[in-house]
Image: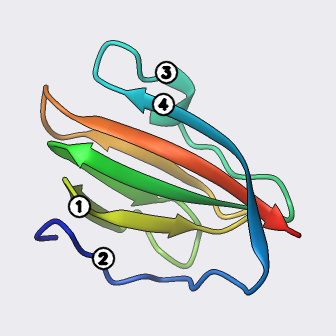
Amino acid sequence: MTGDTQPNQRYQLPPRLSSYRKIGPFDAESLPPGLLREHRLKEGTWANLTVMEGEIGFVWDDADSDGAVTILVAGDRLHVPPLILHHLELREETFSLEIEFLTAS
């Protein structure tokens, strides 16, 4: 990605979502280790992952994606749908990201 863009979104946010929690910003020292392991969002919860500095990999772990990696750089935002397995992959020592959780309003 080139920054200040939305990467090629696999999933579009449904209408009428509301933000209910924001976590971060995280860097290499503060990133929760669970984000580097395979996990999924609960049913009905979407996330916007925003990279504010540096570069990070987002790995799609679901059976349909076969481990495809989306590279995100500063300014990129990625929509993450419910129930799809994924994890983050460190690509640079210096990065900053935040995650906003959304649900139907």
Identify which residue is drawn at 76% across, 72% down: 17
Quadrant where the N terminus lies?
bottom left
- Mark 2, Cα crowd under 10 Å, few <14 / some 14-19 / many 20+, is some
Image label count: 4
Q: Amino acid at mark 3?
A: Pro
Q: Is residue 71 above or below residue 97?
A: below
State the image coordinates of residue 56 (x, y, percent, origin top left). Answer: 25, 46
Q: CA distance from mark 1 to mark 2?
A: 8 Å
* Residue that label 2 marks: 7
* Residue that label 3 marks: 33
- The quarter of the picture where residue 88 lies is top left
Query: Which label's residue is closer to the chain start, 1 or 3?
Result: 3
Image marks 1 and 2: residues in contact by CB distance under 8 Å: yes
- Mark 4, Cα crowd under 10 Å, few <14 / some 14-19 / many 20+, is some
State the image coordinates of residue 25 (x, y, percent, origin top left). Answer: 41, 31
Please state which of residues 49 and 33 is positioned toward the viewer in this rendering: 49
Q: CA distance from mark 4 to mark 2?
A: 20 Å
Q: Which mark is residue 24?
A: 4
Query: Which label's residue is closer to the chain start, 4 or 2?
Result: 2
Q: Is residue 1 left or right of residue 30?
A: left
Q: CA distance from mark 1 to mark 3?
A: 19 Å
Query: Which label's residue is closer to the chain start, 2 or 3?
Result: 2
Query: Which label's residue is closer to the chain start, 1 or 4?
Result: 4
Q: CA distance from mark 2 to mark 3?
A: 24 Å
Please state which of residues 68 and 26 is positioned toward the viewer in this rendering: 26
State the image coordinates of residue 45 (x, y, percent, origin top left). Answer: 78, 59
Identify which residue is drawn at 57% across, 34% down: 23
Please state which of residues 6 and 11 is positioned toward the viewer in this rendering: 6
Element under label 2? loop
* Residue mark closest to the camera, 2 vs 3: 2
Q: Which mark is residue 71?
A: 1
